[in-house]
């Protein structure tokens, strides 16, 4: 199974603070810019800030310039996560001091999506192109991600192990890829952003001589075509 690839670059620039107020609660405004590794704006990214102190989750989505503002309470370290295909990508953390005044920061988040990602927990009935109910959560996450990343186009690549006839496996993998595509379309993703392609048993990632290897080879991958 593929793992998420990421390159983390983050910049903090202290800008201003207000004078001490009479309020007991103080906050920091984060001016966030999200880019790819070439510093191009990255729109449609859902970014989470998870307070390690309270567990509360704050989130925003980058606009067409890759920017957003978010206000967080002072006095906590926040874990930054980026929504990805069917899970959140851990990025880094930012510590906001327990200051008795309001603050403002600039933050730049630069990251890169993996070009190929194996969807977790997407499985089919044996020898069929019928999704198991356990697949729905991952596919719902992917559909939500595609709705944020409105310019993203992907290939849904179906793969099988080597059991049975190679030609039948090729047909089966194509049918399974099309099943995933149809599911995502029903969840609101435009069909012209999804290509279904079956590869049968031709691209194994493990040995087919063990049950564990066969399980790894039976997979559905997301391959980025266009961002």
Image (cartoon, rainbow, N blue to C red):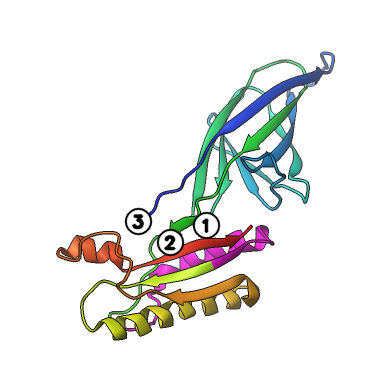
In reply to whether residue 93 is colored magenta, the answer given is no
Front residue of 162/55: it is 162
Q: Residue at x 49, y 57 (%)?
A: 86
Q: Which residues are magenta?
A: 127-154
Q: Which circle marks residue 55 in the picture?
A: none
Residue 177: x %, y % from top left: 45, 76
State the residue lying farthest toward the left.
209
Front residue of 47/219: it is 219
- Judged by depth in the image, the label closer to the viewer, 3 or 1, is 3
Q: Which circle marks residue 119 in the picture?
A: 2
Q: On the image, numbered disc 1 is attached to which residue?
A: 85
Quarter of the image with the C terminus in it = bottom right
Task: Specify whether 133 is left or right of 13.
Answer: left
Q: Residue at x 23, y 84 (%)?
A: 165
Q: Residue at x 20, y 61 (%)?
A: 207
In reply to whether residue 144 is colored magenta, the answer given is yes
On screen, residue 224 above or below 58: below
Is residue 127 visible in the rendered image? The answer is no
């Amino acid at each position: 199974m593929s793992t998420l690839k990421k390159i983390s670059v983050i910049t903090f620039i202290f800008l201003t603070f207000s004078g001490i107020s009479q309020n007991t609660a103080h906050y920091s405004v984060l001016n966030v810019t999200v880019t790819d590794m070439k510093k191009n704006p990255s729109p449609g990214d859902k970014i989470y800030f998870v307070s390690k102190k309270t567990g509360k989750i704050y989130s925003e989505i980058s606009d067409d310039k890759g920017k957003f503002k978010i206000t967080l309470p002072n006095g906590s370290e926040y874990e930054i996560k980026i929504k990805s295909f069917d899970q959140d990508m851990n990025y880094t953390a930012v510590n906001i001091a327990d200051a008795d005044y309001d603050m403002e920061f600039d933050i730049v988040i630069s990251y890169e999506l993996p070009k190929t990602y194996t969807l977790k927990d997407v499985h089919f009935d044996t020898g069929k192109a019928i999704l198991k109910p356990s697949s729905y959560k991952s596919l719902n996450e992917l559909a939500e991600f595609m709705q944020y990343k409105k310019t993203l186009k992907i290939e849904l690549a179906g793969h099988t192990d080597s059991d049975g006839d190679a030609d039948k496996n090729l047909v089966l993998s194509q049918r399974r890829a099309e099943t995933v595509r149809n599911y995502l379309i029903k969840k609101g993703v435009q069909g012209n952003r999804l290509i279904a392609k079956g590869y049968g048993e031709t691209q194994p990632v493990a040995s087919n001589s063990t049950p564990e290897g066969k399980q790894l080879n039976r997979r559905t991958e997301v391959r980025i075509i266009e961002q």
